[in-house]
């Protein structure tokens, strides 16, 4: 059977790529290549055209407030295309600054940045930053998801919106208050966890890949990979954070 390449779109890599977030795209690519599955990565910069109907996984990385201000208009220009992609079941991973763009708005100290409105959620700048290693328990995989968070924004999900997980240990999560971290809606995941997220949590990487094939109707059973080292590292990190 000839398999059509999976197309991974990295949106605005020149600006939204904090704390090694680009490693998420490398991880997705490698996990496909290791299984002999064809893959194409498209880096879509601010001035580039992109036909999202060709995308199978979209990745939006994190960025400091400054980068978010630079990128906001280019992001909004893609609002209808990105919304349509997600509504059609497109797999999407957004981290931190990219995650904040999924909501209605991000209110910084002196300016409100409009969001894509794909998820019913709001972000406001709080006092001080929420910084530290993080661990959450999610419904999408058995292992705790581990990472690193560093954000000034506090995100609150609308009622009925599913978080990606519940915070464990000293993790702050969306706002340091309600115990939720990230968002999970259909085939979309948003999270504050850098790391990069996917190399540290291979189960999350395979979840995205599986959703992308499912949406295309390709019956591809993902062969297990030897993730012993990654999973051991994930467990050590979870234990260090006080989670068994
Ligand atoms: N600028 C945002 C904040 O501080 C996001 C930062 C990030 O992507 N780490 O909340």
Image (spheres, rainbow, N blue to C red):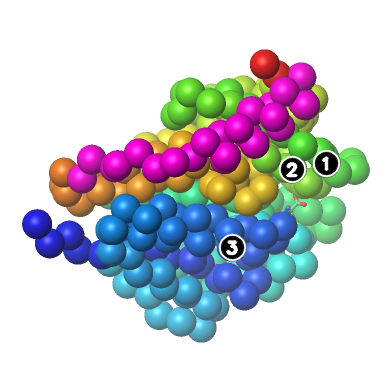
Which residue is at 53% across, 26% downward? Answer: 143
Residues at marks 2 and 3, CA–CA distance in whole angstroms: 16 Å
Q: Check residue 22 in the rendering and tell me which mark sits there, or answer none.
A: 3
Q: Which of the two labelled residues, at mark 1 and mark 3, occupies the earlier sequence position? A: 3
Judge by depth and name the residue closer to the eye, 13 or 34: 34
Which residue is at 46% across, 28% downward? Answer: 141
- Residue 215 in view of the camera: no
Q: Is residue 165 above or below residue 132?
A: above
Q: Which residue is mark 2?
A: 149
Marker count (numbered): 3
User: Marks 1 and 3: CB-CB under 8 Å?
Assistant: no
- Magenta span of residues: 220-242
- Is disc 1 surrounded by few (<14), some (14 to 19) or many (20+) residues within 10 Å? some
Question: Can you give x and y, in whole percent of width and height, for residue 10 in the image?
Answer: 49, 66
Q: Which residue is mark 1?
A: 131
Of the 4 image quadrants, the one containing the N terminus is bottom left
């Amino acid at each position: 059977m000839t398999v059509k390449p999976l197309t991974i779109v990295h949106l605005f890599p020149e600006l939204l790529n904090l704390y090694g977030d680009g490693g998420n795209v490398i991880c997705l690519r490698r996990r496909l290549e290791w299984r002999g599955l064809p893959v194409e990565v498209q880096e879509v910069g601010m001035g580039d055209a992109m036909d999202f109907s060709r995308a199978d996984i979209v990745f939006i990385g994190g960025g400091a407030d400054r980068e978010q201000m630079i990128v906001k208009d280019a992001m909004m220009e893609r609002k209808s295309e990105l919304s349509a992609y997600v509504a059609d079941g497109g797999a999407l991973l957004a981290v931190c600054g990219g995650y904040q763009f999924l909501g209605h708005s991000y209110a910084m100290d002196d300016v409100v940045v409009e969001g894509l409105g794909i998820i019913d959620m709001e972000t406001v700048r709080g006092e001080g930053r929420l910084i530290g290693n993080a661990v959450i328990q999610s419904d999408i995989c058995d292992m705790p998801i581990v990472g690193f968070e560093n954000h000034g924004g506090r995100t609150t999900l609308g009622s009925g919106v599913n978080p990606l997980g519940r915070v464990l240990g000293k993790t702050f999560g969306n706002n340091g208050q309600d115990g939720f971290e990230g968002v999970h809606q259909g085939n979309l995941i948003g999270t504050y966890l850098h790391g990069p997220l996917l190399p540290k949590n291979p189960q999350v990487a395979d979840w995205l890949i599986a959703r992308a094939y499912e949406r295309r109707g390709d019956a591809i059973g993902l062969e297990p990979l030897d993730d012993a080292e990654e999973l051991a590292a994930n467990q050590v990190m979870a234990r260090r954070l006080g989670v068994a």
